[in-house]
Image (spheres, rainbow, N blue to C red):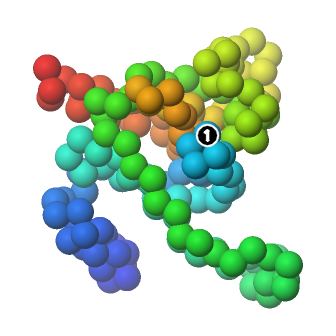
Amino acid sequence: MEAETLAFLKEIEIRRGAPIQWRTFCTWYGTNRHEGLERVWGVFLYRVGDTFYLEDFEHQNTFLGFPVRKRKTDKPYVRYEEYFRRDEVQGTMQISKRIAEKIVQGHLDPKHVKPIKGIAKVFAEHIEMVTLTDGSVLLFSLMDRKTFLAELEKQQRNHS
């Protein structure tokens, strides 16, 4: 691993007071918390103990690999961090990106959402909807859904 990556991971472990037990990158789509928040870019998803964390970082837009200057109308970057404990997870399901956007924008109550199925499952982009016990949802696209679900399950078994 690169020294910069190791330093980044070590900084997180110091901040959290424990080692990272699992990690991946995913695309963060948003939440219905905080009056709705949508950000479509990569984030670092990791687990420390029984808590999962999502952290984003400032991005540099590029075109064909070359940096693109920010426009004056671009909103300033504000770092976003979210977390949830395993025991707060009421359930997960895969939904379409279109449905995820409606949830984040406040046009659809997550309670009325059904899992993606049929032809949409083949062609639509899959978004993981994690429903928490307070009724809020977190929405992100995972590189490896099976491993994420196994990590949630691992924690559940450890608490039993």
| Place of residue 60 in the rendered image (x, y in percent of width and height, measured from the top left) | 68, 79
Q: Quadrant of residue 88?
A: top left
The answer to whether residue 83 is left or right of residue 102 is left
Give the vertical position of 123 relative to 45 (above or below): above
| Place of residue 84 in the rendered image (x, y in percent of width and height, measured from the top left) | 37, 42
Q: Residue at x 29, y 45 (%)?
A: 51
Name the quarter where the C terminus is drawn.
Answer: top left
Q: Residue at x 24, y 41 (%)?
A: 50
Q: Residue at x 64, y 46 (%)?
A: 35
Give the vertical position of 37 relative to 114 (above or below): below
The residue singled out by tag 1 in the image is 32
Front one among 146 and 59: 59
> Outermost residue toward the front?
35
The answer to whether residue 119 is left or right of residue 103 is right
Front one among 14 and 36: 36
Front one among 94 and 108: 108
The answer to whether residue 119 is left or right of residue 139 is right
Q: Quadrant of residue 104?
A: top right
Looking at the image, can residue 31 be seen? Answer: no
Q: Residues within 10 Å of mark 1 (few under 14, many from 20)?
A: many
Name the quarter where the N terminus is drawn.
Answer: bottom left
Looking at the image, can residue 8 be seen? Answer: yes
Q: Secondary structure at mark 1?
A: loop
| Place of residue 92 in the rendered image (x, y in percent of width and height, measured from the top left) | 49, 25
Q: Residue at x 61, y 18 (%)?
A: 111
Q: Count the marks: how many?
A: 1
Give the vertical position of 35 relative to 91 (above or below): below
Task: Name the amino acid, label 1.
Answer: Asn
The answer to whether residue 46 is left or right of residue 49 is right
| Place of residue 100 in the rendered image (x, y in percent of width and height, measured from the top left) | 70, 35
